[in-house]
Amino acid sequence: MNGKILVVDDDELIRTTLSLFLEKNGFESEVARDAESALALMKRAGYDVVVTDYQMPGMSGLELIGQIRVISPSSAVILISGCMDETLFESCGADLCLRKPFAVDVFMESVSRVLGARSRIRYNRPSSTKLR
C-alpha cells in the first residue's frame, strides 16, 4: 500500500531517518522542520498521512493537528513524542500516537495501519467517522 507521507519534526535526524525508511518501503515522502513549513506544504499538496512531533518550536504538534483537520480532513495523523502522558494520547485528535523511542518496524506498521483505516472509512463509512 503506497501513499504520500509528510514528516514534521524539528530534529533533522528523526525526520530524515523516517523519510528514508518510508521511501525504502515504497511511500512518497516529504519533510518539514516545523508546523508552519508543514502547513505551507499542505496547502500546495495533499498527503495521505502526516507524521508530526508533539514538541516543536513555534506551533506545537497539537496545534498542527487542529490545522490539518481544517485544511485536509481526509489526511491521517500520527503524533510522535517522547514526553506525552496517557491523557494527551487519548485526547490529542491524532489517529495514532507513538511514544519515542520506537522501532522502525513499529513505525512502518503504524503508517500502513492508518492508511488502511482511512481507506476503509473513506469508502465504506460516513465521512464523519473518527478513528481510534
Image (cartoon, grey):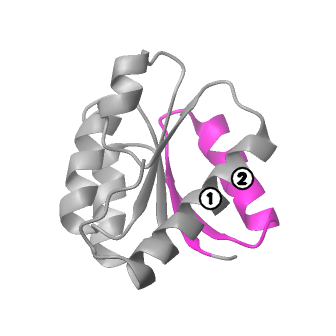
The kind of residue tagged 2 is Glu
Left or right for 35, reference 76: left
**Residue found 74% across the figure and 42% down from its top:** 106
Q: Reply yes or no: does residue 108 show up in magenta.
A: no
Q: Which mark is residue 40?
A: none
Any magenta on residue 10? yes
Residue at image coords 76%, 55%: 21
Query: Foreground: 4 or 37?
Result: 4
Identified by mark 1, the residue type is Arg
**Up/down of 21 relative to 54, above or below:** below
Residue visible at 49% across and 62% down?
Answer: 49
Which residue carries the number 1 mark? 113
Region of the chain picked out in magenta, as a range: 3-31
Q: Which residue is mark 2?
A: 109
Location of residue 93 in the rendering, given as x and y in whole percent from the top left corner: 31, 43
Q: Residue furthest bottom?
A: 123
Residue 27: % across, % down:
68, 71
In the shown orientation, is residue 126 left or right of residue 49?
left
Residue 88 position by quadrant? top left
Give the left or right position of residue 48, taking residue 102 as reference. Answer: left
Visible residue check, residue 56: no
**Image vertical order of residue 7 relative to residue 84, above or below:** below
Mark 1: secondary structure: helix
User: Is residue 122 among what the camera can see?
Assistant: yes
Question: Secondary structure under badge 2?
Answer: helix
- Residue at horizontal 39%, vertical 66%? 75
Mark 2 vs mark 1, CA separation in Å: 6 Å
Q: Quadrant of the N terminus?
A: bottom right
Instruction: Assess whether mark 1 and mark 2 are in contact (beta carbons under 8 angstroms).
Output: yes
> Residue 54, percent across and down?
40, 31
